[in-house]
Amino acid sequence: MPKNWIIKTIEIIIFIIFLFFLLVPLLSTIIWSIALRWYWPNTFPQEIGLDYWLQALGMIKSLTLGAVNVIPAFLLSLGIAIIVVLLTMSIAIPAGYALAKLRIPKFLKGLILILFLLPRAFPQQPVFINLMLVFNKIGLTGTVGGVILVHLVVSIVYAVWITTSTFSSIPPELEEAARSVGASRIRSFLKITLPLSAPGLIASAVFVFLTSMDEFTGTFFIGIPFVTTLPMTLYSASGSNIQFASVIAILLLVPSILFMIIIQKFLKAEYLGGMGG
Amino acid sequence: MAILKVENLNKNFGKIRAIQKVSFEAPEGKVLSLLGPSGCGKTTTLRCIAGFENPDDGKIYLDNRDITNIPPEKRGIGMVFQNYALWPHMTVYGNLAFGLQIREISKEEINKRIKKVLEIVQLSGYEDRFPRQLSGGQQQRIAMARALVFEPEIMLLDEPLSNLDAKLREEMRFEFTEMQKKLGITAVYVTHDQAEALVISDKIVILDQGKIIQSGTPKEIYAHPINKFVAGFIAISSFMEGEIDSFIPEEKKVIIKTNDGLIIHGYNNNLSLGQKVAVTIRTNVIKFVEEKELDLQEKINIFRGKIIQASYLGNTIDYRIKIGRWEVRTNSDAKYNFRVGEEVFFYLPPEEIVITSLI
């Protein structure tokens, strides 16, 4: 079958191009993070070493490399992201369940979903500047609490939308069957709907986590000068020192990759089987 | 085992009146079918009994206990859903054990009961399968087992066989009847399939547009449908319409005249002179008569028609015959071999045709 052969070849070529676009920027970032000396017209750095990594991770304290310590920033970002995930999901799960399963009039449902979307429906800078003015009055600017609130506003729309569609995809009879054999409403939810919607809920939580880890604009307006998350550190490093910027960029990738691995472990075949109905 | 009583149930969805004044009693240890076309309110009625819908009005009693406002989990009613609603993330064992674990029954007892119920539905040894590893028929049996395993007082079934293929559906009808008789459980069975209802039911309630039209045993309903709708719904039938022209009191007969002048004799005691009626002709009542035999017949209810369609079905042939402005369908022995367009004579035995009021 010559046609099959052509299609296979085209597929492989497209795959290689994809990999190229995906990996080359990453590769250049990795090279930059270990380049000690790299001047034009050299294709590769003249001198490589882990000095910037060690300095960034606080393992050496060299005065010549500049004082960037990303560990506190990384831990702060991680802490904020975890709290944001917990807060967002504790709002999004009940909200999504209510929107999907309860008999809410259609217009009201639309109104609620638009309400969650509203902060994201306008250009972000004006929204955050206004938010900053409000937060200024109540003393939330420059605090971790203020930054957490901003991240919550940014991520909740996606979380609610994803959880709503996840819960909607689970046939109501499954919960009714649980109730008919004697399970209370709460038990039916915990034992039937929740495990079956786990993939969607985890996807939603991961999305919120990554949004929070990456969030820059809101953090910038609300958090400065005291709350320096990893993206803020990356921003200040990128102007002066491309090696530090590369180190931070790679560090920002770590949680995403870790999460992908965890999800793969967690998404058991049974759950995926459940998604098909 | 219990008696279920439904009294004056009303339920509206917005402006749609789903059920109106529905009342019936499900006899103890018997099968009651709610039969009707889609949208007739049979499923809504069932969901009210299960507790998934709150009726706007009316009462539901289980053994004289008012359960109208009790949440579904406290009613002790087993339910089989149309799409089975097995929990895909649990094995057969998990599906069956769930209701028992809630009741805090010991593990040995749970294992014993699951073993027993799987024997009843003939799926012993399937404990560790997931629902997706079962065929449609097996899923259906597990759904049945799940509704039975916690030994409910009554069992509700919402078109449980409608997702199976025709052959399996017919087998399952008999299996269900056998199982129900053995367990002696009271069952309320929703279906739109009249053949299914006739086979499995001790009592049939026919619903249309949210109202009960007729209720009775399968025989009563089949032999004495209350109107044209029931007659047409309970069996494949053709109709001729007309009005009561006269009575023959000594024979308890009625004579009907159609508006194109045909005279039909039949039996029915509850009709009055001039009333508009439907003559129901089921597919098995038409007797073909050869022209030379015509003199030997009683001369009543003999008609001349024209074959307009013939479908060969193996041991029978399905004919559509045009008589006057009416078209009747008959399923006749393959020994009668008529061609399309041929003129035929046939006899309608007065005791076999059904005369009902039009509405």
Image (cartoon, grey):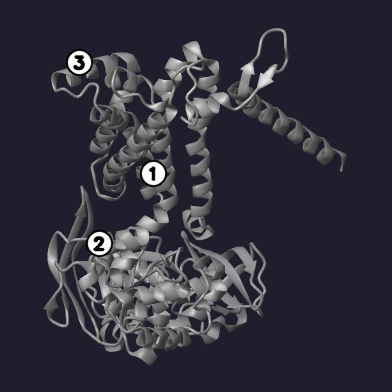
- Tell me the tag on residue A33: none
> Closer to the camera: disc 3 or disc 1?
3
Q: Position of residue B188 (x, y in %)?
A: 31, 76
Q: Is residue A113 above or below residue B117?
A: above
Q: Residue at x 61, y 21 (%)?
A: A32
User: Label 2 crowding class (10 Å Cα cut-off): few <14, some 14-19, many 20+?
Assistant: some
Q: Earlier in the sequence, mark 2 or mark 3?
A: 3
Q: Identify residue for label 3.
A: A133
Dividing the picture into quarters, in which one does residue B104 lie? bottom left
Q: Residue A40 or B254: which is nearer the viewer?
A: A40
Q: Position of residue A4 (x, y in %)?
A: 81, 41
The three-letter amino acid code for the residue at tag 2 is Arg
User: Label 1 crowding class (10 Å Cα cut-off): few <14, some 14-19, many 20+?
Assistant: some
Q: Residue at x 64, y 26 (%)?
A: A27
Q: Identify residue for label 2.
A: A185
The three-letter amino acid code for the residue at tag 3 is Leu
Q: Earlier in the sequence, mark 2 or mark 1?
A: 1
Q: Identify residue for label 1.
A: A165
Q: Secondary structure at mark 2?
A: helix
Q: Quadrant of the N terminus of chain B?
A: bottom left
Q: Secondary structure at mark 1?
A: helix
Q: Residue at x 42, y 47 (%)?
A: A202
Q: Position of residue B106 (x, y in %)?
A: 32, 84
- In screen coordinates, is A105 left or right of A16? left
Report the label total.
Answer: 3
